[in-house]
């Protein structure tokens, strides 16, 4: 009966498209969630930093450098401490050491950004740009130096395997498959988003963060150390970016490639804006961008049958590779101006001088 | 809580002894002594730059003194920072409110002194309860959940006071608390302050408005050039005496405006609608006329459409509808240069953004409107000699205190910057003079000078349109007064006979409400808070 409707001109085409979209999302749900992870973590790195008034466009570089160090350190550690994948998320000592390296790298880069933009009061856009350029150049150079013939690898975390009985449940089984059959970084991202959201709006830290991002001088006059709080938040953002970087090389994949973050740090910024500087909102936006990526892939690899498929396959496939970026542009064009940044975002804070 | 003693009985709550603070080239505070008793409202009077703010910054821990000591209840203390001051019961209400507009009342009050449910989470219920309780005790009930940005300025000030009370402040410093209030709001705040004093709180009230100080203070300390030059009881002094102490010479407090002799109508504004930057209409169908040789003052709480009206007249903003005529010329769609060439001069409210280029030399700023035309330029090439000659003349005539004509305008003091703008705009062949907050932030001496020049222009036959949030300025200078409320001209009154109370009431209510009582509840409509925070 439904396929009958598909034959109606125009309307039928729209219905076919909707059917295809729904299909892509249901089938690829778990993959979309995984692909959304670095975007969500990167966006939350932006949220935590910008809510306190520091613009961070260096997320891309922080993720890339962390991805590199996670892979390199995990590979080396895997040779030093060979071990079978553990029961819990396939964890090995090498992976944990690699993860720690990624977090440390994220924090180190964010410390540079914090120092330049908070202490030195340099232009925050330039500071972020420097981080992106340095991260790209240094990782590409080191990768070249290693001149690997065989691809060393430290392995990767494994997805959690929930009991089959749960997955077989009708309807909610799909949800379980989607949320539970994930690697540890994706699961962590979900938990972080919820906890971060609650803390931002209900805790002392959250209140102070929002005040400092809106009106730092007001915060200072009630005894809050603006500089210190901004440092804390930017460094915490570094942890999130480090975690996002680790996803690339020890969770989703097992090797590093030059420039592998491929603009995701900037899409994360778009997700932050689209999510109105809310952690949960940023996560939702990340899901949307990830879904558009999955859609692009699905159209290229398994185009739908019938008239719709003919139309889609007649379009150059590069268009679909560019889909997440096109969606980003469209979303930002629609939302920017209505989504309001923290008032003091990007403004260096100078303490009431002795004047 | 001490049982509230009279203002003259007990030992001082706060003593500042021999406070000295030097900056390169200036002594901001020179051995200042200040004694404040419990339950006392103590006014600190002085011109801009006299050292009041420095002294209070020292008290609040924002600045360290070079010499001197601070005693709280007779105990010497050192104050390392704002949180230290707050912990000792000293709170400050800053002139520019230190409130976060997007947060609600409760969060603003909590900030920095959070009431916690446990180690991580706020206890907002308890905070709300305490805020309501404090409000009730001091006679103003406020909704803790209202967003601060939506409150009127008067209520924002109450939030600031609540912030201090929530921290159990015993000594409250209020820095020019009435600068942004209407007379009615001022009265209400005074009532709150008296109540606080009656409960034993000590209040330091910083101001340069003489009559207010006389009305509210129990004692008055006058500071000039970093020194205490006198201490007075209100009963023993008057405005003239205080002004002389404050300035160091006799001051003519009220401009001698004399008789005006207006001629025919020069500026006529007809049913003008103007939108703001977001496209909302904020001036609705305004009509009025200004005659040559008269000062037409516009009174109103900041943010009631005055800015947009002024911008429409001076060519900075296109009106949505209506007409503006200058004599026989239609200037409705004139751009700023055309407006200037039609003989409209403009002294903008924000002189740094619109009145001058701070990084340009004083001389260049003086020809900012005429640089392209003879005698300052010939065939597109500027004539430095002519510009320098012009600068010398203006500096002499308008008493601009500067080392030379080549220093950048940004290095001049506020008063001298404004004199520079005034020199450029007043000293030319003009028909209409538009003054927007011409004396904001200036000291008494500069105010006197600018007022005298304005009256001189009027007497020379110029039409003057004066917009000011300072009601006193409008009352002192205007031959006729228009009151703006929510984008409408709600009344046009005769200047010399208009009463302060009547105009104030029109400013606050638009004349629609019959009761002059305080608006109850939190949100008082009518003023866009964003516009009033400088």
Image: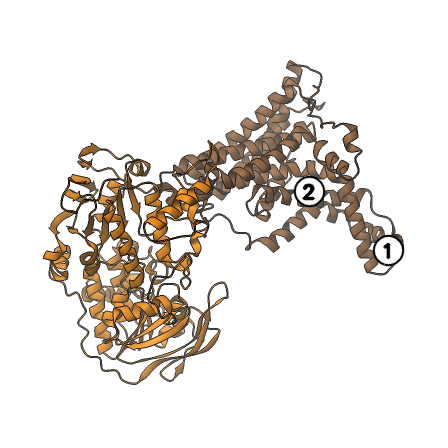
Chain colours: A brown, B orange
Q: What x and y, as percent, mark residue A179?
A: 70, 35
Residue visible at 61% across and 55% down in the picture: A334
Q: Chain of mark 1?
A: A
Measured Cα–Cα span from mark 2 to mark 1: 28 Å
User: In the rendered image, which quarter contains the C terminus of chain B?
Assistant: bottom left
Picture quadrant of residue A118: top left
User: In the rendered image, which quarter contains the N terminus of chain B?
Assistant: top left
Residue A246's place in the image compared with B466, above or below, is above
Residue visible at 65% across and 32% down in the picture: A187
Q: What x and y, as percent, mark residue B148?
A: 42, 52
**Residue most toward the front?**
B3
Residue B202's place in the image compared with B426, above or below, is above
Q: What x and y, as percent, mark residue B210?
A: 19, 59
Q: Residues within 10 Å of mark 2 (few under 14, many from 20)?
A: many
Secondary structure category for the residue under label 2:
helix
Q: Are marks 2 and 1 on the same chain?
A: yes
Q: Which residue is mark 2?
A: A290
Q: Chain of mark 2?
A: A
Observer-nearest of B484 and B194: B194
Q: Can see residue B323?
A: yes
Q: Can see residue B376?
A: no
Picture quadrant of residue B54: top left
Q: What x and y, as percent, mark residue A69?
A: 60, 26
Residue B77's place in the image compared with B339, above or below, is above
Q: Which residue is mark 1?
A: A6
């Amino acid at each position: 009966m439904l396929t009958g409707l598909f034959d109606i001109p125009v309307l039928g085409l729209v219905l076919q498209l909707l059917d295809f979209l729904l299909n892509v999302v249901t089938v690829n749900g778990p993959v979309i969630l995984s692909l959304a992870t670095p975007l969500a973590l990167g966006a939350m790195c932006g949220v935590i930093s910008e809510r306190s008034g520091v613009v961070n466009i260096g997320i891309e570089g922080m993720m890339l450098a962390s991805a590199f160090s996670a892979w390199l350190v995990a590979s080396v550690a895997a040779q030093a401490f060979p071990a079978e994948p553990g029961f819990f998320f396939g964890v090995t000592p090498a992976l944990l050491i690699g993860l720690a390296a990624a977090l440390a790298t994220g924090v180190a880069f964010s410390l540079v950004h914090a120092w330049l933009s908070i202490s030195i009061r340099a232009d925050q856009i330039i500071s972020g740009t420097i981080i992106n350029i340095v991260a790209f150049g240094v990782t590409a150079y080191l990768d070249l130096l290693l001149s690997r013939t065989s691809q060393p690898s430290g392995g990767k975390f494994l997805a959690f395997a929930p009991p089959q009985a749960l997955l077989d449940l009708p309807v909610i089984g799909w949800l379980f498959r989607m949320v539970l059959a994930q690697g540890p970084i994706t699961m962590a991202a979900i938990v972080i988003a919820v906890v971060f959201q609650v803390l931002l709006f209900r805790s002392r830290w959250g209140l102070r963060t929002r005040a400092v991002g809106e009106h730092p001088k007001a915060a200072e006059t009630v005894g809050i150390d603006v500089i210190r709080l901004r440092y804390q938040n930017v460094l915490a953002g570094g942890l999130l970016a480090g975690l996002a970087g680790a996803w690339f090389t020890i969770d989703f994949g097992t090797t590093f490639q030059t420039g592998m973050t491929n603009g995701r740090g900037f899409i994360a910024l778009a997700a932050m804006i689209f999510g109105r500087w809310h952690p949960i909102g940023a996560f939702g936006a990340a899901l949307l961008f990830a879904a558009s990526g999955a859609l692009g892939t699905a159209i290229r690899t398994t185009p739908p049958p019938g008239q719709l498929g003919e139309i889609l396959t007649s379009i150059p496939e590069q268009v679909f590779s560019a889909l997440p970026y096109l969606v980003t542009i469209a979303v930002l064009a629609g939302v920017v101006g209505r989504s309001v940044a923290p008032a003091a975002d990007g403004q260096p804070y100078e303490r009431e001088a002795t004047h | 809580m001490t049982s509230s003693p009279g203002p003259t009985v007990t030992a001082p709550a706060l003593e500042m002894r021999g406070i000295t603070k030097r900056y390169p080239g200036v002594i901001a505070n020179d051995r200042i002594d200040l004694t404040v008793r419990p339950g006392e409202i103590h006014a600190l009077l002085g011109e801009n730059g006299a050292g009041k703010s420095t002294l209070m910054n020292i008290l609040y821990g924002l600045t360290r003194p070079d010499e001197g000591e601070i005693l709280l209840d007779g105990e010497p203390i050192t104050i390392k920072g704002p949180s230290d001051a707050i912990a000792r019961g000293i709170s400050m209400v800053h002139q520019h409110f230190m409130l976060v507009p997007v947060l609600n009342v409760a969060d603003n009050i909590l900030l920095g002194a959070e009431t916690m449910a446990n180690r991580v989470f706020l206890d907002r219920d308890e905070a709300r309860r305490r805020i309501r309780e404090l409000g009730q005790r001091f006679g103003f009930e406020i909704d803790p959940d209202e967003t601060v940005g939506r409150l009127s300025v008067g209520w924002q000030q109450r939030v600031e006071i609540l912030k201090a009370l929530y921290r159990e402040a015993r000594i409250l410093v209020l820095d020019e608390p009435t600068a942004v209030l209407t007379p009615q709001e001022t009265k209400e705040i005074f009532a709150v302050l008296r109540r606080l004093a009656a409960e034993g709180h000590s209040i330091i009230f910083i101001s340069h408005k003489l009559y207010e100080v006389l009305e509210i203070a129990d004692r008055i300390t006058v500071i000039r050039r970093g020194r205490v030059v006198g201490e007075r009881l209100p009963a023993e002094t008057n405005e003239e005496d205080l002004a002389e102490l404050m300035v160091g010479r006799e001051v003519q407090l009220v401009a001698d405006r004399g008789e005006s002799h207006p001629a025919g109508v020069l500026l006529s504004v007809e049913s003008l609608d103007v939108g703001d930057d977001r496209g909302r209409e904020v001036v609705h169908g305004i009509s009025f006329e200004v005659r040559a040789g008269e000062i037409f003052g516009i009174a109103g709480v900041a943010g009631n459409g005055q800015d947009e009206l002024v911008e429409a007249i001076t060519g900075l903003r296109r009106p949505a509808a209506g007409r503006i005529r200058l004599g026989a010329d239609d200037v409705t769609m004139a751009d700023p240069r055309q407006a200037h060439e039609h003989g409209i001069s403009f002294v903008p409210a924000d002189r740094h953004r619109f009145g001058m280029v701070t990084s340009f030399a004083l001389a260049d700023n003086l020809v900012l409107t005429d640089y392209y035309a003879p005698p300052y330029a010939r065939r597109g090439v500027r004539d430095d000699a002519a510009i320098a000659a012009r600068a010398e003349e203006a500096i002499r005539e308008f008493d601009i205190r500067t080392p030379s004509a080549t220093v950048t305008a940004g290095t001049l003091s506020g008063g001298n910057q404004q004199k520079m703008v005034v020199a450029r705009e007043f000293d030319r062949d003009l028909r209409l003079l538009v003054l927007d907050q011409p004396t904001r932030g200036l000291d008494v001496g500069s105010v006197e000078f600018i007022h005298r020049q304005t009256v001189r222009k009027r007497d020379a036959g110029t039409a003057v349109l004066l917009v000011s949030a300072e009601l006193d300025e409008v009352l002192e200078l205007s031959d006729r007064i228009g009151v703006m409320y929510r984008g409408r001209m709600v009344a046009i009154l005769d200047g010399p006979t208009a009463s302060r109370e009547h105009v104030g009431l029109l400013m606050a209510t638009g004349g629609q409400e019959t009761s002059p009582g305080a608006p109850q509840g939190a949100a008082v409509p009518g003023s866009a808070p964003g516009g009033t925070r400088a």
